[in-house]
Image (cartoon, rainbow, N blue to C red):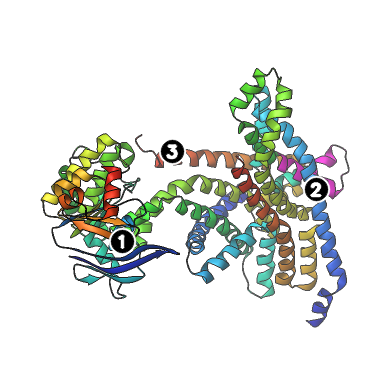
Amino acid sequence: MVNVKNIHKYFGRLHVLQGVSLDVAKGEVVVIIGPSGSGKSTLLRCLNYLEPVQSGEIWIDGIRLDHHRTNIRAVRAEVGIVFQSFNLFPHLTAIKNIMLAPVVVRKRPENEVRQAALAMLAKVGLHDKVDAYPSQLSGGQQQRVAIARALAMQPKLMLFDEVTSALDPELVREVLEVMKQLARDGMTMIVVTHEMGFAREVADRVVFMDEGRIIEEGTAAAVFDRPREQRTREFLGKIL
Amino acid sequence: MPQYVQDRLNIYDAILLLQGLGNTILLCLGGLGLGLVIALFVGLGRASRFRWLSWPAGVYIEILRDSPLLMQLYLVFFALPLLGLNVPIFVAGVTALMLNSSAFMAEIVRAGIQAIGKDQWDAARGLGMGYIRIMRHVVLPQAFRVMIPPGVGLLIGLIKDSSIVSVISYIELTRVGQILTEKTFLSFQVFGIVAALYFLMCYPLSKLAVYAERRLKVSG
Amino acid sequence: MLLDGALTTLHISILTLLLSIVVGTVGALCRMSHVRWIRVPTTWYVEVIRNTPLLVQLFFIYFGFSQINIDVTNYTAGLAGLVVNNGAYLTEIVRAGIQAIHKGQFEAGYSLGLSFRQLMRYVVFPQAFRVVYPPLCNQFIGIILWSSLVSTISVQDLALRGKELASTTFRSFEVYIVLTLIYVAMTLTISGLLKLIGRQLFRQPA
């Protein structure tokens, strides 16, 4: 499903990704952990071409991302991403936020999209907030709308960029519940997070990154309980 | 028509342009100098907590800001003779510019004064200072710094506004442009040069305003 | 007679506003372009207009048309001058509006597969409009006041009609006082209306 081959990325002189390779199979849930500045968010954002890479290859579902013939918009429609700062459209209600892309990009008829959007809102537990504006919602509710908005495009892959880091602690759980259900339903997910409990419960694989490189990967139990690398041990020691 | 081109290149025209430039500067200095004094008092009045001060100041400001400078110029030009004063056009021009700029400047003064937080007032009153002393030693010195960036913007506006005095035939820079264009029919060249002269006066000031604003933000 | 003039003033002001908004939007997008030979000349345009007087710009265009032997009505020349002038100020206003929008909005839009045009239409401009509305209203008031300068190139607006009235009745002072009050009344009414409209448009449940 996702094949990343030895990519390098620079921000000016800063070598942010130093030869990263990663393969994610369909239905797999991969959690990426690491200290800030390790490049994990950047890696995620390269996967839907929000950031271009300077060398290496990225393949999503058999399509190469940086090929000049690739229709980036079509690829982006198949890859859903949820951001740390939600990025909901403040001038649209919750349901309109969700409906915008399917109507405008996939050109589906409005009532069909509206039905689907209502179902999506129910799925994330917000059936009573259909016509609410983002300013009227709590952080956790906004983030769930953001997830619903990404899901409304029926993507093949979902990316989560530290989606709970900006939330008050008591609101984190409701968002993680939605994500766990998504994993159980078989969605291919790549999640950048600090939530180790979440990783233990649903991750098929955990990847530890530091300073632009993948240091170690394995099952959650393997990485958390029996880390092989020194740097992994140091990092886990600081946060566990 | 070669003879006109030769006319245009002649030195007298260049001198005329410089004279116009000089008169423009004179207009601005006059308008600014007197305007600032008025603005200080009107601005203080507008910021005052006494209705009988802030309301008339408000009316003064609104009327001058919500009517065209052209109208104000005509009013001054035609009104003053009725009061028996035979005014030269320079005085009419300066008066109109002075009144107009004083209104905008008064708002800048008001904003500057009101930008000084209540804490400063509390501290000064606690030290036993009266209104005038507080204004003189605490509020106005601080407000002055705040007023500089918009003040420079106002000066730029004044330089541009001075062009309007050309309509009462005062020989400032724009009027010279009209005269030379009538003579040579070379509008693009003549007004190009005129515009360039205004630009040379205003552009450095606009950079100064940006610089002043940046320094203001840095030192808090 | 003055009424005719007032209508002309309103007429030319509204046209100027609409055309300037178009110029300003294009200008703003150019100002933010990554392409240097688009961005830099646009910046020059804005700086030149902002640092030279409107009257000079009007004369430049008005007398310029006759210099290159193009026949236009005074109204058209005046309108052209006003649009060129206000287009520069609108460019800065629209640019500020677009730049006020959080970068994440662009990222979210692109990530959902929106094209540039779709992003602008559904996400950016609705939000930018909110930011832009107050300065836009101020600019419109400014246009109404400064449009009086077209009287100097013989456009029959309120200012010129007033001047004619003053010279025919020989009661200059009273006429100009009335004229000034008419402008003030127009300005205050229109800005009040615009504020009301603004409050209605941007009313969101708190």
In screen coordinates, is C124 left or right of C19? left
Residue A205, by quadrant, is: bottom left
Name the kind of residue labelled 2 in the image.
Leu
Give the secondary structure at mark 3: helix
Range of residues picked out in magenta: B78-102
Identify the subunit bearing mark 3.
Answer: C
User: Is residue A1 something that shows in the picture?
Assistant: yes
Q: CA distance from mark 2 to mark 1?
A: 65 Å
Q: Position of residue A22 (x, y in %)?
A: 23, 64
Q: Amino acid at mark 1?
A: Arg
**Which numbered disc, 3 or 1, marks the residue closer to the eye?**
1
Where residue A198 sits: x, y (%)? 19, 45
In the image shown, does A186 or C58 lie closer to the viewer? A186
Q: Which residue is mark 2?
A: B29
Asked whether A37 falls inside the magenta stretch, the response is no
Name above or below for residue B217 compared with residue B120. Answer: below
